[in-house]
Image: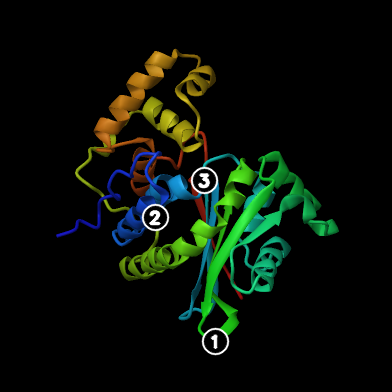
Amino acid sequence: MTNYENPPATPPPANTDPVEAIVRAAESALTVRRRYQFFVWTQSYLSRLIPHQLAVCGSYDRGSRELVFDVFNSVSLEPALMDALGDARSLLMQHWQACWLDARGKPAVITTADLAFASLGSVRDALLAAQFQTVLVHGVSRPQRPQEIESFFVFAAQDGAALAEHASRLELLIPHIHGAWQRVQAVERDVGSPSTPVTPAIKIGGVTQREREILGWLREGKSNQQIADELGISALTVKNHVQKILRKLNAANRAQAVAQAMSLQLLERGPAPLPAARTRVLP
């Protein structure tokens, strides 16, 4: 029996054949039931195929007739940009959705510099400041009704050229991304709040304040040396802290440790915000 409360299994090595990697990513997507599991899956299986530091995931809730967007980022973003990414009615999100619809439901590569609207100047600058020169967007519409979007996804990477090269992979993966995200929404509606943690056999009190600080920097994607520079300690000390964190959170790698910390709400008071922001807006 599959344990759906555990994060997905360890992803294949980076040098795995792309076809095999796609198959394994699709199989692993079936185990995703919770938001933190989705985050681990995107940071492991999906990032091997579609390298990214930002993922915006949107789905339509028929019960409330609302669009719900979540923002998963592994680099710091300006508040104004976060607000625009989480708002389905923002000019930025509307523009990206229009570009996708213009592409007739195919993955669309959009250049940030082309955001020429005067009202998007600050948002465009924030994207460029994060080194997101291009974004890759794709989604799923209702059958025979292309204008009615069921789910919509935005991926951005600091290596925009590599991201654009993998648009064909996104075409193959979109059914699995859509399915996993819809499943997360359904499960978390059933259990109540998306922030309700699934507590594994972990002693939350065993994670020290310093380890929470380091978890916050891990969430930012910083290396051991970068964390050491931030905290004024040695990189070896940081490495030892990370190893202790992995043991305490029963995590196989850093992404899983951050995901476990999210589910246990250990990052709420850390040096960085949670890796996702959830906003409900009217269509």
Residue 68 at x, y = what percent? 52, 67
Q: Earlier in the sequence, mark 1 or mark 3?
A: 3
| Left or right placement of residue 117 versus residue 260 in this view | right
Residue 222 at x, y = what percent? 50, 29
Q: Secondary structure at mark 1?
A: loop
Q: Quadrant of the N terminus?
A: bottom left
Q: Is residue 156 visible?
A: no
Q: Is residue 249 visible?
A: yes
Q: CA–CA distance between discs 2 and 3?
A: 13 Å
At label 2, counting other C-alpha atoms closer than 10 Å, the crowd grade (few under 14, some 14-19, many 20 or more) is: many
Q: Tell me which residue sits at (39%, 56%) in the image.
A: 35
At label 1, counting other C-alpha atoms closer than 10 Å, the crowd grade (few under 14, some 14-19, many 20 or more) is: few
To which residue does mark 2 refer?
Answer: 22
Q: Quadrant of the C terminus?
A: bottom right
To which residue does mark 1 refer?
Answer: 144
Residue 57 at x, y = what percent? 52, 61
Q: CA–CA distance between discs 1 and 3?
A: 31 Å
Residue 51 — which label? Answer: 3
Nearest to viewer (mark 2 / mark 1):
2
Q: Amino acid at mark 1?
A: Gln
Q: Is residue 259 above or below residue 181?
A: above
Residue projecting furthest to the bottom: 144
| Left or right placement of residue 197 versus residue 177 in this view | left
Q: Amino acid at mark 3?
A: Pro
Residue projecting furthest to the left: 1
Circles 1 and 3 in contact, beta carbons < 8 Å: no
Q: Earlier in the sequence, mark 2 or mark 1?
A: 2
Q: Tell me which residue sits at (49%, 78%) in the image.
A: 64
Which one is nearer the viewer's eye here, 225 or 83?
A: 225
Circles 2 and 3 in contact, beta carbons < 8 Å: no
Residue 91 at x, y = what percent? 73, 64
The quadrant holding residue 176 is bottom left
